[in-house]
Amino acid sequence: MGLLSDPHCRRALSRLVVRLNTPLCVLSYVAGLGWFLAMALPPLAPRTYMSENAMGSTMVEEQFPHGERALAYGRDFAAQKKKAGGIPVAWLEKTMWGLGLEVYKQPFARTLPFPDESRERYMVKGTNIYGILRAPRAASTESLVLSVPCSEGTQNSQAVGLMLALAAYFRGQIYWAKDIIFLVNEHDLLGMEAWLEAYHDVNVTGKMQSSGALGRAGAIQAAVALELSSDVVTSFDVAVEGLNGQLPNLDLVNLFHAFCQKNGLLCTIQGKLQRSDWDTLPAYAHSLQTLLLMVLKQGSGRPQGDHGLFLRYHIEAITVRGINSFRQYKYDMTTVGKTLEGMFRKLNNLLERLHQSYFFYLLPSLSRFVSIGVYMPAFGFLILVLVLKISLLGGGPRMGPGGLWEGPRPGLLALVPPLVVCHAAGLALYLLPVLGQRVATQHFPVSEAEAVVLTVIAIYVAGMALPHSAHSDRGWMTLKLLALLYLAAQLSCAALLNFSLGFLLAATMVPAAAAVRPTGPRPVLAALLVLSTPAVTLLLGIFLHRELEERPAGLAEGWQLFLQALAEGLLQHHLYGALPFPFLALLTYPCWLLLWNVLCWK
């Protein structure tokens, strides 16, 4: 503080920042990327541990014996589903009533803003079925949820069978202090959103239509979404990324991992099985791949399972997927049921909501984690580049044309036209694709979904043809100062809520934002600025994601995945309230256009 309060020291520091601005910016950017790459190393990724005392041990004797019964339920459900051509509502109601549960059904309907061509649906109608097991030792003040999505075809029939077998076994136990809800939701996330909105008596999206008298249990404390691909399970994969990058409390993930270890189940995250040789280079590369996959998925803001919608309601939830691969270890339904039984018995012991462990973290494996205090410096170093450039433009001494301007600064009134034009382009990018789809289909031979995606691309590219320069030869410096302040503020806010989104945007946009100016090698700066646009970041992220999953995509396939991601982003926003699309359209894209205006300044 004394250094900053002393006028002589402050002037000396200011001269140092001006003289070494570019080397300091390069050093800060390299330090940010280096810090991120180092987060997969053991010193920065300590071992996970259980923080909640009520779940600090797996000393529970699991006795679930109904593995064969679960398989029989699964076969009956698959047969009834094939016979009914959809979810067998009557059969599920009858079966759940026979198990002694309070059974309710919830019809719902939702018209999508435009057709979802990947799933071939537009006007969606379905029914959710759920049964409530009332706790014999409490007054229905709290509850737990075991949900199973009813997918098309024969997929996940085994999960429904296991859920029914668990319900039958849980019904005979007397130690439950929380109600347990067994939910079968149709149409994946749409059905889950309809159920959660009706259960909490809210209408978040404003367009969901549901009917039926809903029976309620206590306040939901935790939820597990179960997905099984076959009768035989070789490993479990846990999904933690929720809507808008939200994550469940780390204790819930640790609980799942602990019971998998107790029962000898192989468990993975991001499809990666953790390694034991942490001090080797291959192990570091493996951990870094897992970390990058989580960053890419969290940055997308898309829920990676039905659990992702629970997190909006402050309900800790994970999705557990049973995988049948070519591994030699195979586990039957009895072992899987014991694992879930142990998890629910430990959750039954909770006296309060999970809160003692981390809500902001990254996972290079299931046994190690990177906390918010460790990963935020990586983002801070990237933002420091913008701070250095802002200090150069706004607070440094007056220099000649090679540095800052001499004399008075240009007026801010001259910057109003580019600000208005850039934000109008962002508003058009947000509103016009969905509102103008019918007009586009009437004038062009395209479907509604294609019209939406092509309109997004057309508006995005057209914004680059709208540079506006004021009547001042040094006004670009004020415009760049404003753009850098704008970019630093929005990236900082994004990183606080979704670190991965903020970091990915900062890693791609900061170098171009710091370097852009109307003087110098304009073609090189233009290429750098185009490569830093959020659309290119999305495209490169798709290719990187496929490489990390060891399923590399060609140019044609990558382009199709890019178009599909654009449509998915709009649907996720309109259906569930995902924020990445409005954030990019209304904030990041206009800010990038301001930088484009700086480059095109005459």
Image (tube, rainbow, N blue to C red):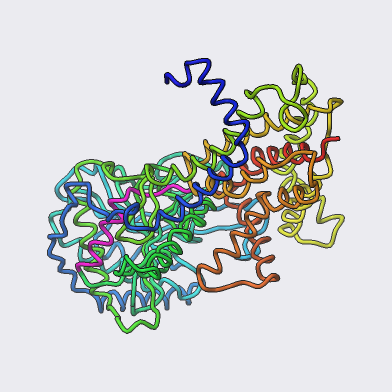
Tally of numbered tags: 0
Q: Along the horizontal axis of the image, is 77 left or right of 470?
A: left
Closest to the observer, 594 or 157: 594
x and y percentages locating residue 343 in the rendered image? 24, 59
Q: Main secondary structure of the magenta part?
A: helix
Residue lying at 63% horizontally and 44% vertically, measured from the top left: 584
Q: Along the horizontal axis of the image, is 71 left or right of 178?
A: right
- The quadrant in which residue 393 appears is top right
x and y percentages locating residue 389 in the rendered image? 62, 34
In the rendered image, is residue 155 in sight? yes
Q: The N terminus is located in which quarter?
A: top left
In the rendered image, is residue 226 in sight? no
Please tell me whether residue 406 belongs to the stretch shown in magenta: no
Residue lying at 17% horizontally and 44% vertically, measured from the top left: 138
Q: The C terminus is located in which quarter?
A: top right
x and y percentages locating residue 84 in the rendered image? 48, 72
- The quadrant in which residue 366 appears is bottom left
x and y percentages locating residue 534 in the rendered image? 65, 49
Residue lying at 61% horizontally and 52% vertically, measured from the top left: 569
Q: Along the horizontal axis of the image, is 552 left or right of 295?
A: right
Please tell me whether residue 246 belongs to the stretch shown in magenta: yes
Closest to the observer, 557 or 242: 557
Closest to the observer, 163 or 248: 248
Residue lying at 83% horizontally and 40% vertically, measured from the top left: 466
**Taking 409 as reference, is 352 above or below it?**
below
- Bounds of the magenta segment: 245-262
**Taking 551 as reference, is 247 above or below it?**
above
